[in-house]
Amino acid sequence: MVDVSDKRETVREAVARALVRMRPATLRLVRRGDAPKGDVLGAARLAGIMAAKRTPQLIPLCHPLRITGVDVTFRDDVRRGELAIEARVRTVDKTGVEMEALTAAAVAALTVYDMVKAVEKGVTIARIQLVEKSGGKSGRWTRRRARA
């Protein structure tokens, strides 16, 4: 485990995203809250928040952090059958929250899959990625957008 004893505590934030692809009809079911298991987005939001808080128990050598905030939000494109999940995690600590944000996005996406698999088994989870981080010695980093 990396020794962070000499690092300064700073405000740190990380944002990660995941993309869940499904049939448009399945996404409409998700939006209405009519999935067989219930409120997909509510369950996925809660799962993402819980996952961020448990990251050191899931990822070897991750430092336990004092997380000060976690937001999990959703944006959908029904025509394309895409649900974008964004997880934003904040702390004031000696190391960053990138792994917590990535874990939150991934677990939220897995929860969506679990809650709709009875309707559609072919759901795909794609592009789990860090999109930005701030704080600490390295400062701000933002993923460059891919050119179309």
Image (spheres, rainbow, N blue to C red):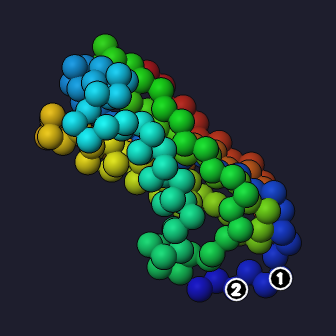
Query: Which mark is drawn over residue 74?
Result: none
Q: Is residue 40 above or below residue 32?
A: below
Say few, some or many: other residues with alpha carbon within 10 Å of mark 1 (under 14 / 14 to 19 / 20 or more). Answer: few
Residue 23 visible in the current orientation? yes
Which quadrant holds residue 64?
A: bottom right
Gap in Å between the C-alphas at discs 2 and 1?
8 Å
Q: Is residue 132 left or right of residue 52?
A: right
What residue sits right under mark 1 in the picture? Answer: 6
Q: Is residue 27 above or below residue 6?
A: above
Image point 54% across, 53% down: which residue?
49
Which quadrant holds residue 27?
A: top left
Pick the front one: 35 or 90: 35
**Could you say where residue 83 lies in the image, as x and y percent from the top left?**
38, 30
Image point 37% across, 45% down: which residue?
109
Q: Secondary structure at mark 2?
A: loop
Image point 64% across, 83% down: which residue?
2
**Could you say where residue 88 lies in the image, as x and y percent from the top left?**
62, 46
Residue 17 visible in the current orientation? no
Say few, some or many: other residues with alpha carbon within 10 Å of mark 2 (under 14 / 14 to 19 / 20 or more). Answer: few
Image point 54% across, 36% down: which residue?
73
Q: Amino acid at mark 1?
A: Asp
Q: Quadrant of the C terminus?
A: top left
Residues tagged 2 and 1 counted as in contact (Cβ below 8 A): yes
Q: Is residue 140 left or right of residue 57?
A: right
Q: Quadrant of the N terminus?
A: bottom right
Q: Secondary structure at mark 1?
A: loop
Q: Residue furthest top?
A: 79
Q: Is residue 90 above or below residue 43?
A: below
Q: Amino acid at mark 2?
A: Asp
What residue sits right under mark 2 in the picture? Answer: 3
Pick the front one: 86 or 53: 53
